Image (cartoon, rainbow, N blue to C red):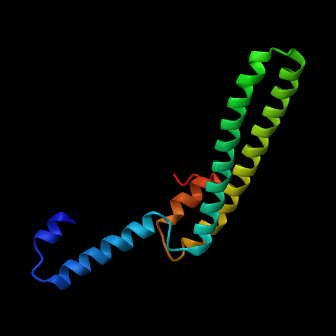
Amino acid sequence: MHDRLQSTRSVDEVIQHHDFFLDKCLRGCLLLLPDVLKKMEKLKSVCLQYAAATQWLISSSIDINSQSHPQKTMIRDTTVTESIFNFEREFNSELQSLGPVLSKGSQAEPYLTHLSQWILGVSKE
């Protein structure tokens, strides 16, 4: 882009290059397709919930370890494991549901095809 800007002769050309750059950024960040954006937001939400739960579990496990109750620790470990599996299932479910949305969007945006195939586990070699 820098080279293109060096060869511009008018403000209109600069604006045109800038618009092209912004469009490319929006496409690359998956921000032009509302359905994809919604799915990405849901994935982000699951990740943030997992991070908050992990932070809470770490801080509360420090309290439990300092009190040293073996039975509470065993119950706690089971609960933690179940929570992690639940987050993993929810994340994988959302990720799998993103594949068809990307596949549908790939008709308009061909660069989404590879991402869709990767999410769905399809190898095109």
Q: Residue at x 43, y 69 (%)?
A: 26
* Residue drawn at (37%, 69%) of the image: 24
The image shows residue 30, relative to residue 12, as above or below, that is: above
> Is 3 drawn above or below residue 33 in the view shown?
above
Q: Is residue 83 left or right of residue 21?
A: right
**Residue 43, image x and y in percent?**
64, 56
Question: Which is more toward the observer, 89 or 104?
Answer: 89
Residue 74 screen position, x and y as percent: 86, 21
Q: Nearer the viewer, residue 62 or 13?
A: 62
Left or right position of 59 against 123: right
Residue 14 shows in the view:
yes
Q: What is the x, y in percent for residue 1? A: 22, 66
- The residue nearer to you, when weighing 88 against 59, is 59
Q: Is residue 122 visible?
A: no
Quarter residue 60 falls in: top right
In the image: residue 110, left or right of residue 2? right
Q: Residue at x 10, y 73 (%)?
A: 7
Q: How many marks?
A: 0
- Residue 85 image offset from top left, x and y in percent: 77, 39
Query: Residue 84's image quarter?
Result: top right
Could you tell me which residue is drawn at 68 percent across and 48 percent down?
49
Q: Is residue 79 above or below residue 119?
A: above
Q: Is residue 78 above or below residue 101?
A: above
Q: In the rendered image, which quarter is residue 8 located in?
A: bottom left
